[in-house]
Every structure is written in structure tokens, then in C-alpha cells.
Amino acid sequence: MSAEDHAGHEQQQVAVYDRGAAIEQSDAFENPGLPPHRPRQTDLHPEKERRAERQVVGWFLVSMLGTVLAIVAYVAVPIVEGDMTSVRLSNLFLGLAIALALLGIGIGGMHWARQLMSSHEVVEERHPSRGSEKSRARAVEIFQLGDQESGFTRRSLIRNTLIGAIALVPLPAIVLFRDLAPAQDAVEAISNTMWRQGTRLALDPTGTPIRAADVTIGSAFHVIPEDLKDLDHDGGYLDQKALASVLLVRVPLDRLNEQPDRAGWSYDGIVAYSKICTHVGCPVALYEQQTHHLLCPCHQSTFDVTDHAKVIFGPAKRPLPQLPITVDDEGYLIAQSDFTEPIGPSYFERLHHIDEGHIPLSAAETENRA
Ligand code: FES
């Protein structure tokens, strides 16, 4: 390409972009235009129009029926705690009824649009900004035309049943939101676990009791109450396990920093702490042998085992609750009582509870609760 050709080519490029038309124009296809308008049966026969109208009304009535059935299903098929059949049945009937309610509105609306609203095709110019007064007046005119052609105002039965169906559809949600409320007092629910005075500490998941002599320095045991194995899944096994899970570690006695009011809660350097993180409840499952730190894998809260599991890093706001332990006559590790404070996340209810002063259970109280 010569220098003049090159310059000419560049001028051509500049000319193209100067016009602001950086889009390749193509005349490969001609505008096919609109197909000829074909009137529908409902446009030609008034009786078919009336039948379509009845069908639309029918679908909106079906929607109303579905909404009512959803509420009836919620009341008539209650969920019984621990009964999975009742959960399945409740979900099945609720799902079917709500699907019917939504389907009725959807099909009715589509049928209305396809069979009764105007079927004329319209070409509309789009404007990027606010239109002129004239175009706005035209918009109002078009809106009124749409209203006239759809029959929204004129076909009052369809309009009213649609409004009724839409107004009723949220009702099941309002009823179902009731289940979001806690079934019992949250603090109460996490204040009691299976630990009792004399309950043996056992390995998770085998349930084998642990002898103090088997816990060597640096080792960490995932622990459950020995009698947890007596529960089955319907008897609340998982719930109780989530509350009572404990981490057991042994640290050198000279590293253990015990407060006077907790003297005697450990046994020969063996300490037990709730495994449920006080941030938002993940299992604290990582133990650093060298530093004697427990780590929560969710948000890296770190607890110092040698100092009452106090928080030394991360978002947790309070130490892991300690389980007071000792040994029985046969050398097995046992609990002295339940935890003396609620386990798990420090939501405001619990902080309030702690601020008010949680009174540790005496051995007699623990006995009574057993
Ligand atoms: S749940 Fe443990 S740090 Fe967040």
C-alpha cells in the first residue's frame, strides 16, 4: 500500500468514526415487515368471546380456591414434632395449593391476553428521555385505548376476580410466617444439655467412655455424653448432640491458668469446653498442639485453652463455656454438672441473660434436673 493509499484509508476510517456510526451497516436482509393480521375466533364470534371470558373468570376462581386450600391445609395437616410423615404431607398439600393459586392467576392472565385483549400489532418509536407534552398526551391516549381494548374497566367481572385472586395470594405467606417465630425461649433451649453430675465423657461417635489416663498431653478428643447413644434420631439424638458436644484436651499443669472460682473444674490438666463456637455456632474443631489454641474454621475465632478458652482472635465475643469434670472410682472422666451458662452463639438474648448474672447450678440442682 503506497503512502497516499494509506493516508486515504486513514481518512476514510476517521470519516466513519466522525459520523458517530461505529456500527457496521448491512443491507444483507430486507425488512420482512409484519405478517397480515388474522382475526381470532373470539374476534369473529361473540359467543366464543363470552366463553373465553368465562374461562378467564374460572381460572381466577381456581386461584382463589387454591389460596383458601393452602390455609386449610396449613391448619388441617399440622406438623407433629419428630414425625417426618406429617412434615411431608404438610409440605405436599401446601405446595399443591399454593401452586394452584399461582397457576390460576398465570393461566387466567395469559388466556385473557391471548383471547380477549386487542391483537393488533403496534409499532412504537422509543424515546430516550422525557417526551414532549404532545407525546405524553398521546401516551395517556394509548393507555386509555389499552384499557378500552383490554376491557379492564368494561369487563368488571374479570377485573374484580383478578383483583380478588391477587389480593388473596399473599395470605398463605402471612400464615406461614408464623412458623418463623422460635418455638420456645431461645436462651432456655440452649441452657440445658444432657450433661449431668456423673455422666461419663465418651468418644464421638462410638460412645466409648474415656479414662483420664488415656488423655495424653497434646491430644484432643471430640466428646459426647455416654448416654447419648441411648437416643435414636426420633428421640432427638442430633439436637442433643449439637448441644452437648465437647472438646477435651490435656495441657501441662504449669501452663494451666485457672481462676479460683473454677479451681477443680479440670482434672490433672484435662479441660473440657463446649465445641459450639460462641460466634455463630460452628463446631470449633481445630486444635493447635503447640500453642494450645482452639480454632473455629468458619471465621477464625481462636480460643486459648490454657486460659478458660478466652477469645484471643476473631469475631467471637466470649469464651467457650467450660464443662466441669472430674474422674469416677474407675478412672473414667465424668461431668460434675451441666454447663453453667448457655452454650453457643452470643445473641442479644444470651448477653442479656449473662448480664443479669447466670447462677451456676449446684450439684443438688443438677440432680433435680436429671
Ligand atoms: S462461627 Fe466460629 S468464628 Fe464464626
Image (cartoon, rainbow, N blue to C red):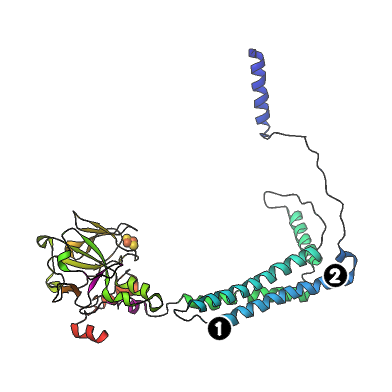
Secondary element at tag 2: helix
Q: Is residue 204 magenta?
A: yes
Q: Is mark 1 within 8 Å of ligand 1?
A: no
Q: Earlier in the sequence, mark 2 or mark 1?
A: 2
Q: Mark 1 — residue?
A: 75
| Drawn side of residue 39 relative to residue 332, left or right | right
Which residue corresponds to the image point at 19% horizontal and 86% vertical from the top-left? 364
Disc 1 crowd, CA 10 A, few/some/many (<14, 14-19, 20+): few
Which amino acid, by three-letter code, is at mark 1? Val
Nearer to the camera, 225 or 320: 225
**Can see residue 154?**
no
Give residue 72's position: percent from left, percent from top: 60, 82
Q: Is residue 225 magenta?
A: no
Nearer to the camera, 142 or 131: 142
Q: Please tell me in which quadrant of the rendered image residue 269 appears.
A: bottom left
Q: Please tell me in which quadrant of the rendered image residue 323 appears.
A: bottom left
Ligand 1 located in image quadrant: bottom left
Q: Mark 2 — residue?
A: 49
